[in-house]
Amino acid sequence: MSEAKKYPAPVTNPETAAFWDAAKEGKFMIKRCTACGEAHYFPRAICPFCYSDKTVWEESSGEATIYTWSLMRKSPTGPYAIGYVTLKEGPSLQTNFVDCDLTTLKIGQKVKVVFKPTDGAPLPFFTPA
Amino acid sequence: MTIKGKAYIAGIFEHPTRHAPDKSTAQLHAEVAKGAIEDAGLSKDDVDGYFCAGDAPGGAWPMVDYLGLNTKKLRHVDSTETGGCSYIIHLGHAAEAIAAGKCSIALITLAGKPRTGAMPPRAAGAEADFESAYGATTHNAYGMCAMRHMHDYGTTSEQLAWIKVAASHHAQYNPHAMLKDVVTVEDVLNSPMISDPLHRMDCCVVSDGGGALIVTTPEIAKSLKKPLVKLIGHGEAMKGPRGGKDLDLTYSAGIWSGPRAFEEAGITPKDIKYASIYDSFTITVLMQLEDLGFCKKGEGGKFVADGNLISGVGKLPFNTDGGGLCSNHPVNRGGMTKILEAVRQLRGEAHPKVQVQNCDLAIAHGTGGLLGVRHAASTAILERV
């Protein structure tokens, strides 16, 4: 696979800065609402389910299963596999799959988070566990 | 309050071009506006409502000025932007405005040139840092939906291919269609894989061009010379991953916009004689047919197979102009052309080889945005009076 692929640095903002600070330490964070108990992703200050502002940061296990994927074969930067994974903690999120044979991905496959560098904070990706 | 019967489509125009390197985008808007106004038998100075979306250069006020609309008369403007289904939403909003007395002759335009040059990027949403690096495009966002639909319901590439086959059967009679050759299921399966599991022939065309509508009151429509086409039901809805809870990419927001429109119209999918269904990709059609209630969730594959969408052959003639898959997908936005062919069918102006007999009830439905990420949907139900 393409080793030289360059990813854009996150712009970040006051609502999400803690996520990117944690990413620099290799931690993958989600938000959980202490009012309704639900976890969500990407992180928001206000819980999207109950509108409570009592949301707190929580480190995710980074363990997930593939919900769906698609291998983009026509791309000026080379093929890449986009997909959604469902975290052990509940929320699903969009990602790319990396460091593996992209033609053998399967729905239901176990994957784990891995960070890739940018010119700013590193970005989370997933790879077969 | 309902919009049922409060507004009629009195003028339509689809630009015949599919490649317009020698024209400006604003010029294409003007050409389709002129076409629809003339089709209705009206003058530009009659227009008192204007509707446009993100494809209009500079937005509503530069377009109103460029088009030379009568600003002493123009009293209602709406630039709702919901991607490809914007124009179906505009149709409903025009009916609402007409029902409320806010305007009486509404012009809706779409035009642009993605085939000639790259489209400007969308403005970033709150999700940008958490998604934009992963390269979601139309192809792979719809590919992800198809992949999961196949997993959950056993839908096959062969079944998806039948949607393209049906569109190609219709496109052979459309002199303006980009792709006029009739194709087979094998042709689709043998076309290159673009983004698994979608092949090149599962994807729509990229075309320059545009289209426009005139929406008006029942009284004005009856004073004009065109066959009467009435809006009797309308729905709109949106869907996204919503914090990642209960993600399900096998249905679209059409599951909400469709029932809203059918309830307002007081009819069911069984009553529909002709369906314009947004066909950015074959999977888009399959999922929307399920969501609108033409078949049960998960049975779309069986429903579309064996030519069921071919006019004169199957039970639900769809996209008889060849649709986005074969004819036209101006500005990468398929909502406008869906309304245009539905009106042609209801007027009896479709090509004789694909005209549905006694076509009195039609649906025009579309999505905007990315089905596998965040999107809008809108449904319009139209009746020939």
Image (tube, coloured by chain):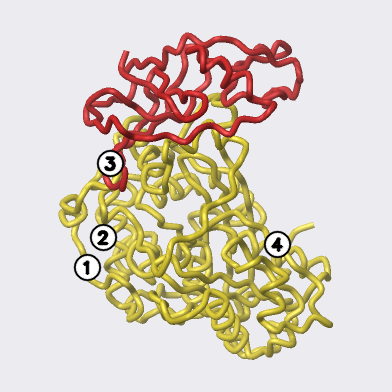
Say yes or no: labels 4 and 2 on the same chain. Answer: yes
Amino acid type at circle 3 is: Gly
In three-dimensional space, the C-alpha distance between marks 4 and 2, rounded to whole angstroms, equals 34 Å
* Extreme residue in the front direction: A119
Alpha carbon distance from label 1 to label 2: 7 Å
Mark 1 neighbour density, 10 Å: few (under 14) some (14–19) many (20 or more): some
**Structural distance between the alpha carbons of marks 2 and 3:** 30 Å
The residue wearing badge 3 is A78
Q: Chain of mark 4?
A: B
Looking at the picture, which amino acid does disc 1 mark? Answer: Val
| Mark 4 touches mark 2? (CB < 8 Å) | no
Residue under numbered circle 4: B93
The amino acid sitting under disc 4 is His
The span from disc 4 to disc 3 (Cα, nearest Å) is 43 Å
Disc 3: which chain? A
| Nearer the camera: disc 3 or disc 1 | 3
Q: Which residue is labeled 2 in the image? A: B165
Taking the spot 29% from the left edge, 62% from the top edge, the residue there is B166
Residue for point 38% across, 64% down: B206
Palette colour of chain B: yellow
Residue sitting at 26 percent across and 41 percent down?
B156
- Subunit under mark 2: B
